[in-house]
Image (cartoon, rainbow, N blue to C red):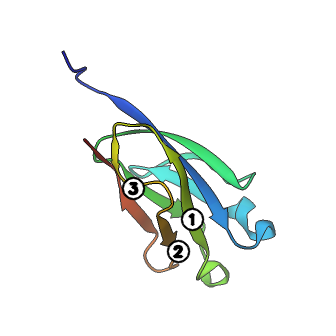
Amino acid sequence: MKPIFSAGKITLSVIGEENKNSSLSVLINGEVHGKFVHKQMELIVRDHDIISIEGATANHDGLQFKVVSTTNNVLFPQVNNIFKLDHIENQLFTVEFH
């Protein structure tokens, strides 16, 4: 029997200038999950969670985030997907499970 609320993990890595990352927060469904203190962050996610970045400015345009790993139940995003940050649109992706 499948659990009602299954969870998965996604590890995101920042590609770009490290000194700009500490002002960026990762949001899951609009709630702050944490800040990019290091180059990588592990997210505990559920199906249809919306992953976005807060604190992005024009200085962050072009900053990229790479999916380093996921658990087997995550359909999207996939490992090695890269998402480019645009300070106007801060949503990176919506999580999809199998």
Label 1 sits on what residue type?
Phe
Image disc number at residue 48: none
Give the percent coordinates (x, y) of residue 67: 52, 56
Q: Are marks 1 and 2 in contact (CB under 8 Å)?
A: yes
Q: Amino acid at mark 2?
A: Leu
| Residue 30, image x, y percentages | 42, 52
The residue nearer to you, when weighing 87 against 4, is: 4
Disc 3 is placed on an element classified as loop
Q: Closer to the N terminus: mark 3 or mark 1?
A: 1
Farthest residue, direction right: 19
Callout 3 crowding tier (Cα within 10 Å): few <14, some 14–19, many ≥20: many
Q: In the rendered view, does 7 fall on the left or right side of 86?
A: left
Residue at mark 2: 85
Mark found first going from the N terminus, 2 or 3: 3
**Disc 1 secondary structure class:** strand
**What residue sits 41% from the left and 35% below the top?**
8
What residue is shown with label 1?
65
- Image depth: mark 1 or mark 2 in front: 1
Q: CA distance from mark 1 to mark 2?
A: 8 Å
* Among the two numbered marks 1 and 2 on one chain, the one whose residue lies closer to the N terminus: 1
Using the numbered discs, state the Cα–Cα distance from disc 2 to disc 3 in whole angstroms: 15 Å
> Seen from this angle, which residue lies furthest left?
1
Q: Is residue 90 above or below residue 96?
A: below
Identify the image quadrant of the N terminus.
top left
| Quarter the C terminus occupies | top left
Reading the image, the residue beneath label 3 is 77
Disc 3 residue type (three-letter): Pro
The secondary structure type at the circle numbered 2 is loop
